[in-house]
Amino acid sequence: MRSYVTLMVFLVGIVFESTDLHAQDFSRYKVQPKINLKALPFDLNTIRLLEGSPFKKAMDVNAKYLLQLDADRFLNRWRINSGLKAKASLYGGWEATSSHMLGHYLSALVLQYASTGNKLFLEKANYIVDELEECQTARKTGYIGGVPDEERIWKEVVSGNVKTSGFDLNGGWVPWYMLHKVWGGLIDAYMYTGNEKAKQIVIKLSDWAYTNFMKLPDSQFQQMLECEFGGMNESLAEVYAITGDKKYLDLSYKFYHQKVLNPLANRVDQLGGLHANTQIPKVLGSARQYELTGNQRDYNIADFFFEAVTNDHSYVNGGNSNYEYFSQKGKLTNQISTNTSETCNTYNLLKMVRHLFTWQPDVKLVDYYERALYNHILASQQPETGMMCYYVALQSGKEKVFSTPFDSFWCCVGTGIENHAKYGESIYFKGIDGGLYVNLFIPSELNWKEKGIVIRQETNYPEDQTTTIKIDSKKPSKFTVYLRYPVWATHGMQLKVNGNPLKINVKAGSYITINRVWKKGDQIEATFPMELYTEVIKDNENKTAVLYGPLLMSGALGKGKVTSAQVPVLITNGAPVTTWIKPLKNKILSFKTVGVGRPNEIELIPFYKMYNQKHIVYWDLFTAQQWTEKKSAYETEQRRQSELEILTVDMLRLGEQQPELDHKVTGENTGIGEHDGEKFRDATYRKDPKGGWFTFEMKCDPTTPLALYCTYNGSDGGNRKFEILVDGKTIKTEELAAKNPGKFIDYVYPLPFELTKGKEKIEVKFQAYPDNVAGALFKCRLVKIKK
């Protein structure tokens, strides 16, 4: 992955009291780090964003949304589960069946308060803490929760009766994941605002967890960890840090998921096929444990995981995962869809960068941070409404899909309201030598209180390629400035101190050092000329993305429907990108292809500015000869895909969390697996009287004949006989016989019109014959029969 612009400056004389990366007052920690830190972030409340930045605009529109939200609606189930009367009805979307948003909302409020000083956000945060205290007092056990049916779930699990299938724990959807969010929110409320009540609530909640789960046998605990549990290890390590009580650290290590973390500890990449954001918070926990213990195994986990994900599982925008799952190592070409780059993943990876940077400041870490911040996090927000993306689609001819204000509340809405409240947090870092890293070109002001220095960064970056850093010091102060020379600035950069040119003796991708006594009115002016360049996807040299400086550029395809066959390709003949993409006059950060587009030329704009229309991120490139040879086959395949897209009424990817939840998948003796990077579900019928089966719902078109398209592994055979039923009626008895080894193959099952006529949905069931397996089924489409 190519590196991007970062500006870094170091100042003098810092006492390192903690490694926590979201703390506002490090003195609140009882446990000091066991490792030698090299850098620390400044408190968020010492940094203010200035006007003139897309990040300031994003934070402002997010702030308006936070104030529109009603805490009592998020608290509904928390109060009811505590035997108290709800004060308001539940929100819709995910909140109708889960309670993950409350913790995110609490965190977002205190982040917004720290970022702005606006007490409206503090008042809302304090209100939530007061309400949670009332819930905890009413329950008398230390526990608080908004998990549906939580009393039964926890009673069964504590007794050792643990049943899980990945996202289901004893019939409840990811209960630890939901609780982890409020653990984090309460810790944030304490660390950012000093709310002692929040600290006491989270300690009592942690005591409940210790009392009930510490003695659970490891085998049962590991079985429980098969269900997504967020970053419970991180939160419990934080509670240890703020209390000094080692029992919480011990419990945090009980949340060590051996199956996932052991390979990472040995620097082995077995991430392909794993649910991505289930794993990242676990690794964040290991990072925090390393800081508190110095355990080398924890270091290896965090260090190797970040390296593996960013090098071998990430897209050009810094995001990762397709339909929430990691691709196989280095294989991304066939993993580009509408459901690429889940935003939660990058939210958590940016947290990982902040840990790694404190251990060893490294240009590459901030390279990734800036890439992901512009091209995924900022790009995931609708800049007019403040709504957020679950996935940031990278498939050509598609567009970003945004949440609604009160009826979505996806996981990425929860992390999203935090993302856009804390853009100031990584602009500046303190160095071990007293330095100040200015990591990002975001107009902002840092009040370095202990030094009596104000650092003001003024810039219109990225629309302008120059940033100016002004120093306002009460008295002269000597410190070294470490200024990063962007790796993409291959045409050189210009640097001035107080208007005087400074000779640069290092290459792009290095640090420039400026050591002097700084006084009031001094300033540094740095100009980084941006150029166009390309980056191919790892496993296909003919599929490429276009970048300009740190910005991912995307092709604008308009608001109308764009089929696969209508997506342009580029006939570049291997020429440099600057010969076939040219800047548009009088349009900032806008370009257009010249003489290479088929069937037409395309305008390009930054991906973070692309919304409410279809786009291209990855371009298919050909030489003229290649296009002559492949044009017919390429266009035939594109037309086939376009036709299938147009005719598809509904599509389910089996074995994947959200698609299965959306389609209400259930069954007996059924499980999920993975083959060649694709998830599947099957069901086994041995001697269990319940048999082996699974069902799911599909949206239906009541007006036209339909067919099921079922995707199987062409290598599957032997004892794979099963019935396929629609609304209880058998439509096919299937028996897989390995007829197409090494390939995925679609079987088409036309449905009698009387089965679907007048229906808005149908239930599909796969029922195994005795001593047989039903499936494996990878995908199922409900498709209109072409007339």
Image: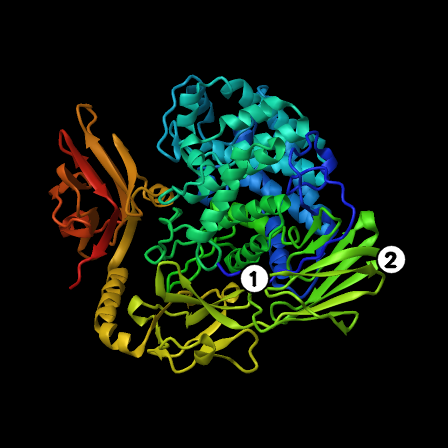
Image height of 703 relative to 730, above or below: below
- Residue that numbered label 1 is attached to: 4
**Image: 488 above or below 12:** below
Q: Residue 677 appears at what percent x and percent y?
A: 31, 47
In the displayed structure, does residue 753 sit left or right of residue 95? left
Q: Position of residue 302 (x, y in %)?
A: 52, 41
Q: Left or right of 564: which side holds 296?
A: right
Point out the image quarter for the C terminus.
bottom left
Q: The residue tagged with tag 2: helix, strand or loop? A: loop
Q: In this view of the protein, can residue 89 be seen by the observer?
A: no
- Residue 54 appears in which quarter of the rendering? bottom right
Of mark 1 and mark 2, the one earlier in the sequence is 1
Residue under circle 2? 476
Is 99 left or right of 114, judged from the image as shown? left
Amino acid, disc 2: Pro
The one of 245 and 720 positioned closer to us in this rendering: 245
Numbered marks: total: 2
- Report the disc number at residue 102: none
| C-alpha span from label 1 to label 2 | 32 Å
Identify whether 334 is placed above or below 127: below
Q: Residue at x 51, y 39 (%)?
A: 300
Q: Residues within 10 Å of mark 2 (few under 14, many from 20)?
A: few
